[in-house]
Amino acid sequence: VLAWFRRMRENAPVSHDSEAGVWHVFRHADVERILADPGTFSSDFSSLMASQEDVARFIKGNLLRKDPPQHRKLRTLVSKVFTPGMVAQLAPRIEVITDELLDAKAGAEQMELVSDLAYPLPVIVIAELLGIPVEDRPMFGRWADSLVAPESQTSFIPNAERTQAMAVVMREMNAYCLEHIRHRRARPQDDLASRLVAAEVDGQRLDDEEIIGFVGLLLLAGHITTTALLGNVVLCLDEHPDAAAALRADTGGLPGAIEEVLRFRTPLAPSMRRTTRDVQVGEHTVPAGQIVLAWLASANRDERQFSEPDRFDIRRTPNAHLSFGHGIHFCLGAPLARLEVRIAVQKMLTRWSGMSIGEGVEHHDARGIVGAKRLPLHLRWA
Ligand code: HEM
């Protein structure tokens, strides 16, 4: 796919794919411009999906799928609750959860990174944050899996069949989240769900459906991508032993290294938009009402933006990757994802004297997600 990106950036940076019914955009400058202009490139696909009541309910509070001005109301309210300061306070708890997961493998010569650490860590963190009981956690892991399952990803355009399948999962999620929120309304606790219920900006509050949508978004957005990123760090360090050695010697370089992994192996490869009017992108006029795939993963390798883009350089500065998006929809969970992955990698590097990738690595086949589903590791202990 990287070869395809390179070819397209060079020869057809904006191209219409009539078979899939979408426009692809490959260059950094064009991708950034699209993400910076929500008036022309809308994130609202409800006209394509909302025929289903469950889906409509599910996306009501999903700010990722909202345009201004609704996006602003939701984002302002949830940003008040989901602050970088609140995330920073989670560090000690993330350390404990990571230690517990790694302790289960103490002395082991092998582990499977995804199921032993990369998957459960973000799930547990998000669940605790929301105040979801331990016994219910496997359930939303299942929901998340079915919403990104390969069969739901065969096309980027939500068709009737896919919408129907997603609606079933969303109905379950809606019902569960609604009950959780009603509980918190009745008896607030010290968790994110209770704070969302109470949040107020300029006399506005979130209603139940908006909270459901946001909670649903957190459950999904928060863990598949972070799982992928943690696996991608391990894959990159395995391919680049010099970088691994440098980080082992000085884990202070980890934040920069994680940014470079985000650029080099972009967990969420495209962002999707819908044109609201005819618009010129590069040399093409994209008509109104078209789906546009802005390829973050291609933008991140654009030789017009990055020097030696195919070189993995943990000290790269500047590193204007687009892996968390850009503009009004910039990932709200970026501080949390960065923190979780930094803590996890730091502990892996200090616990083990070495790690190498074993047989049987499996990658996501869902289009759009770049990451391992299964990542067996051999561990060396000092
Ligand atoms: C938005 C990537 C982790 C919550 C986004 C967007 C990207 C992204 C690319 C923008 C999409 C667009 O504009 O179409 C990632 C990656 C992650 C990650 C690569 C991990 C490595 C998280 C986490 C959370 C989260 C941990 C929450 C716990 C959100 C939310 C939005 C968002 C709520 C929507 C923001 C808005 O529309 O205003 N993410 N994300 N993400 N992300 Fe993340």
Image (cartoon, rainbow, N blue to C red):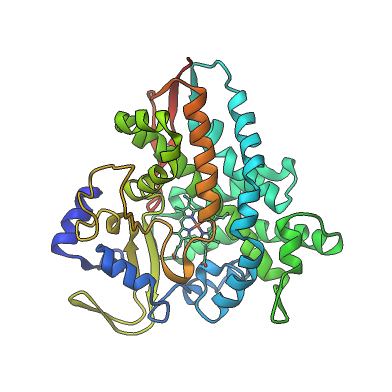
312 relative to 214, above or below: above
Q: Is residue 133 left or right of residue 150?
A: right
What residue lies at 37% left-to-right and 59% top-to-bottom?
Answer: 322
281 relative to 215, above or below: below
What residue lies at 42% left-to-right and 33% top-to-bottom?
Answer: 250
| Residue 146 point in image, percent of width and height | 54, 49
Q: Please state the total of marks drawn on the protein image.
A: 0
295 relative to 254, above or below: below
| Residue 306 point in image, percent of width and height | 24, 55
Viewer-nearest residue: 233 or 343: 343
Viewer-nearest residue: 46 or 40: 40
Q: Is residue 240 left or right of residue 54?
A: left
Image quadrant where residue 228 sits: top left
Image quadrant where residue 272 sits: bottom left
Q: Is residue 237 left or right of residue 98?
A: left
Image quadrant where residue 232 sits: top left
What residue lies at 81% left-to-right and 55% top-to-bottom?
Answer: 189
Residue 302 appearing in the image? yes
97 relative to 316, above or below: above
| Residue 179 point in image, percent of width and height | 77, 59
Residue 169 appearing in the image? no
Residue extending farthest to the right is 187
Viewer-nearest residue: 315 or 158: 315
What residue lies at 46% left-to-right and 54% top-to-bottom?
Answer: 152
Residue extending farthest to the bottom is 277
